[in-house]
Amino acid sequence: MRFLNALFEGKMVIKSVEFRDKEVLPFHPNGKKILYDIYCTTDRGEHFILEMQQVESDNFTTRILFYGASAIIKQGVRGIEYDIAPVYCVVFTDFYLSGMSHTLLKDIVLTDRYTKEVYSELLRLIFITLPEVPAEWDDCDTEILRILYLIKNMENMTRDSKPYKSGLYEEFFDAASTQMLSAEEAVAYSDSYYKELENQSAVRLAERKAMERGMEKGLKKGMEKGMEKGREEAMIDIARKMRMRGISPDEISSMTGLSLKRLREL
């Protein structure tokens, strides 16, 4: 509630939030099932969908639009009275949206392409770009910037950090403590944590393979060049470059054919 009230800068005051089932089944057998990060409604009936995305993926913005539209359809308006509650999709991204300007906030509604007049605000897509959040706590001079700073940096903070010592955001630190999680939440947190470790491991493996492929290409190119000036001179040149990259003498010896004794002489 504190975050949402800060986001709307007093133009909307949220007094209570009710969390809804995050899983939404499709409207027909062949439809897509939706699993929101956070789905809640306010005391006035507004629907809020909060999502976090670390890496941009295919059709990402289209997926967010689908989420919001589904929340409108899910209200099941019947008869001639289309009394639809507003739906807000608030999306945190750790990247810049492709093809769009680099700004902290993007507040998207239906507008006329030519006059820029607002047609409807019943569906609002609000994108928050975390890379635009100031790197230093002292540079965060508004409530929303300070909260976004906490969201971005909470996992690296300690009780000695300036935000903690300020005493203004104790409930954020309390909520972030895994000791306060229920058994089901703790399991979900653990699953998410290990999934993130697996993702990081996959990235490191891909980087290592790319480096190995680059080394192999470099070695092959060096060997071809070495045919002109002599095999040993070429291998010596390659060995020096490999050593400058921190590769061990044993590996260099294996890949160049130069003995360890010869490498020590070099």
Image (cartoon, rainbow, N blue to C red):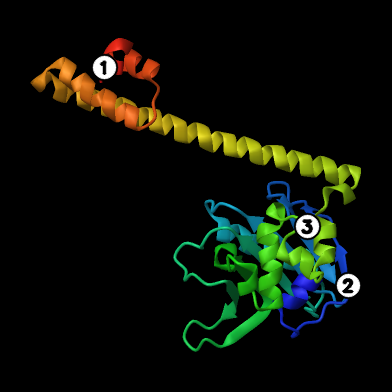
Residue 92 visible in this rendered orientation of the protein: yes
Q: Distance from label 2 to label 3 (Cα)?
A: 29 Å
Q: Earlier in the sequence, mark 2 or mark 1?
A: 2
Question: Which callout, 1 or 3, points to the residue nearer the camera?
Answer: 1
Whether residue 37 is situated above or below residue 65 in the rendered picture: above
Can you name the residue that lies furthest to the front here? 265
Considering only order in the chain, which callout, 3 or 2, is on the residue closer to the N terminus? 2
| Distance between mark 2 and mark 1 Cα atoms | 75 Å
Report the side of 214 relative to 168 (left or right). left
Q: Earlier in the sequence, mark 1 or mark 3?
A: 3
Residue at far left of view = 228
Residue marked by disc 1: 265
Describe the element under mark 3 as helix, strand or loop.
loop
Front residue of 18 and 121:
18
Q: Secondary structure at mark 1?
A: helix
Q: Residue at x 39, y 26 (%)?
A: 247
Q: Considering depth in this image, is 110 or 255 the residue closer to the camera?
A: 255
**Position of residue 58 measured from the top left corner of the image (x, y, whole percent):** 52, 51
Q: Position of residue 22 (x, y in %)?
A: 79, 54
Residue 70 in view in this figure = no
- Count neighbours of disc 2 (C-alpha within 10 A) and say few if under 14, some if 14 to 19, many if 20 or more: few
Relative side of 102 to 144, left or right: left
In which quarter of the view is residue 76 placed? bottom right
Amino acid at pointer 2: Ser
Decide: few, some or many residues near mark 3? Use Cα within 10 Å; few <14, some 14-19, many ≥20. few
Identity of the amino acid at label 1? Glu
Amino acid type at circle 3 is: Arg
Mark 2 — residue?
16
